[in-house]
Amino acid sequence: MINQREIMQTIEMIDQQHLDIRTITMGISVRDCAHPDIEVCSRKIYDKITRCAEKLTRTGEDIEREFGIPIVNKRISITPAAIAAESCECRSRVPVAEAMDKAAREVGVNFIGGFSALVHKGFTEGDRKLVESIPEALAATERVCSSVNIATTRAGINMDAVAMMGRTVKEAARLTASSGSMACAKLVVFANAVEDNPFMAGAFHGEGEAECVINVGVSGPGVVSHALQACKGAPFDVVAETIKKTAFRITRMGQLVAQEASARLGVPFGVVDLSLAPTPAIGDSVADILEIMGLESVGAPGTTAALAMLNDAVKKGGVMASSHVGGLSGAFIPVSEDAGMIRAAEKGALTIEKLEAMTCVCSVGLDMIAIPGDTPASTIAAIIADEAAIGVINNKTTAVRVIPVEGGKVGERVEFGGLLGSAPIMPVNRYSSEEFIARGGRIPAPLHSLRN
């Protein structure tokens, strides 16, 4: 049971420290929507989404009003569309994305994930058709998000898929040049993608999931920052314990909302993802947490160590508060969505190379990073390969969401709006990776993948 003291602490965290439920995400299986005619398949996907998620937004709003807990987003994820549309005979998968977008608009969610493919060991014909459709699909829709898994620890890295995703990112940027290459903000390239991630743009409903589930993503960088104000000068043991206790309280709130939404919707509760997800709002920044620990600026020597401790303490505290912790569950470092990261990038304290080092110890990877529009596709592919290597060798989820801003130059800023924020365009190493990427094939799985 949640006692009165916990309730009062939660009220303070909500009122003064930017605590919220970042998303309630309903995962929906659309495997039963398969049909050779893409129009029929798309209609079945639309019908199933609108039927299952009909009450999702209203239920979230009711819980928000009754409990006084802000629920920022209500979202949907579906089975990877490459699987659902595998038998469709036409080349383009854009009609599926348009059906997803229409359904998302109908039920009132801000994003729908799952225009996705899992190609870590190779392509099926359906996978290839979907990946080829990604740029047009994201340009033609408002709420659809896409992800492609190109590597796992057990399979290695599909370098043909890596090269293809470099070209896909470039084409998506070109097709949405008038909106700051916005399509790329809705496209994630994964290694070791998880099946129960509630956060966009990488959410999809995994093959091992139930027919329909509710996953909740919490937030809380502002709460952790506030708690650490009382730890100035204290040793790291005290800092870690403070973060752990704070993460426990944050996750308890997520567990409460998840169980309530599950009961009201009659849908099984999946997981609470206890990731610290920042926003562009002042005081709601992962970078601020690291600077409170004693760094002059995020990006300074010591940043990776501080982030590692933060990530570990968040996991230890969160796992005690919920019987079902999943998703990504750690600290996010998206540049455009974190005021402190933006500040550090603009003054040159934070580089892409330092961000890559930080991804070794935190959730996900190189996230929401704007780069010059003239960056070659092979360089983007090589960035994806580097990040995938970190995930594969360390047996963790990593991802790349970079935005090559058409016409954009280093030092300029691109605005995305809302939670996506704005990003300074960061410099990229100008030496060529073209010959490296052109090799193709598959980088084999590491020796420690042989665990059976």
Image (cartoon, helix red, strand yellow):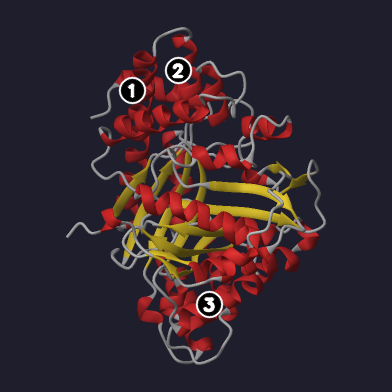
Please report whichever mark, 1 or 3, sits nearer to the chain's N-terminal start. 3
Whether tag 1 and tag 2 are in contact, CB under 8 A, the answer is: yes
Spatial CA distance of label 1 from label 2 is: 9 Å
The reply to whether the C-beta atoms of the residues labelled 3 and 2 are less than 8 Å apart is no
Residue 130's tag is 3
What residue is disc 2 on? 227
Q: Based on the displayed image, in which of its 4 quarters is residue 181 positioned?
A: bottom right
Residue at the farthest left position? 452
Q: Nearer the viewer, residue 356 or 26?
A: 356
Q: Secondary structure at mark 1?
A: helix
Residue at the outermost top position: 233
Determine whether, in the image, residue 418 is placed left or right of residue 67.
right
Residue 231 image point, x, y percent:
44, 10
Check the picture and name the quadrant holding the C terminus: bottom left
Report the amino acid beneath label 1. Lys
Residue 70 against residue 377 in the figure, above or below: above
For label 1, the residue is 245
Q: For the residues marked 3 and 2, what is the alpha-carbon distance in whole angstroms?
A: 45 Å
- What is the secondary structure assignment of the residue under circle 3? helix
Is residue 165 visible in the rendered structure shown here?
A: no
Dot 3 or dot 2: first in sequence order is: 3
**Residue at horizontal 36%, vertical 55%?**
196
Nearer to the camera, 124 or 393: 393
Crowd band around label 2 with a 10 angstrom C-alpha radius: few (<14), some (14–19), many (20+): some
Which mark is in front, 1 or 3? 3
Q: Earlier in the sequence, mark 1 or mark 2?
A: 2
